[in-house]
Image (spheres, rainbow, N blue to C red):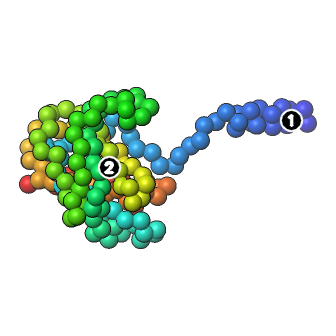
Amino acid sequence: MRSLSRSLVVAAMVLSVVSRIYPCSWAEGYFYQVTRLRGKVVGAKMGPLQYARWLRQSFVRSGAKLSVYEYRRPIHSRSDMPLIKATQADNRGSFDFGVLQPGHYTLIVDDDGWGHSDWFDFEITKLPKETDSVTIDISPHFPDCKGGHEFVANAK
């Protein structure tokens, strides 16, 4: 009886200090490799229909604000990273950052219509095939990490 009450007290103490666990998290230190950063911002909030990639990526996000920052870790807020360039997606969802020097960067896509931001770490580097365009899917993702948050590089 005494060991049961001790076990309950220990379990309660452990549970009170355990941090919140999110079922979906993105790997830090993973960089999408591209030779240039231009393409299209897409995405939609469609509930379970978001699992249909082709459907959610058929909605362009015109007016999305895209900002490229110098990659830094650890950070507490965006102000911890120097801003390199910023642009806005046109009415077709298209954007082009022009020439970026080789290196590691963080892309932050803000969509005021949704009130959230999506972050992607990428690297400008030489590759066997030049990057023609990228598709940035800022659809919200589900707890199983599916349904959105995609950075798709399309080579020539």
Q: Is residue 34 left or right of residue 69?
A: left
Q: For label 2, count other residues whose C-alpha is less than 10 Å away and answer few (under 14), some (14-19) or many (20+).
A: many
Looking at the rendered structure, the secondary structure element under dot 2 is strand
In the image, residue 40 sits, relative to residue 99, either above or below, namely below
- Give the residue pinned by disc 2: 109
Outermost residue toward the right? Answer: 1
The image shows residue 36 at horizontal and vertical percentages of 14, 45
Q: Earlier in the sequence, mark 2 or mark 1?
A: 1
The image shows residue 18 at horizontal and vertical percentages of 64, 36
Which sits in the foreground, 75 or 52? 75
- Give the residue pinned by disc 1: 5
Q: Picture quarter containing residue 136?
A: bottom left
Q: For label 1, count other residues whose C-alpha is less than 10 Å away and answer few (under 14), some (14-19) or many (20+).
A: few
Which sits in the foreground, 120 or 63? 63
Q: Is residue 66 left or right of residue 27?
A: left
The image shows residue 46 at horizontal and vertical percentages of 42, 69
Which sits in the foreground, 131 or 129? 131
Task: Please name the residue shown 21% across and 64% down the image.
Answer: 92
Q: Amino acid at mark 1?
A: Ser
Q: Amino acid at mark 2?
A: Val
Cβ atoms under marks 2 and 1 closer than 8 Å: no
Looking at the rendered structure, the secondary structure element under dot 1 is helix
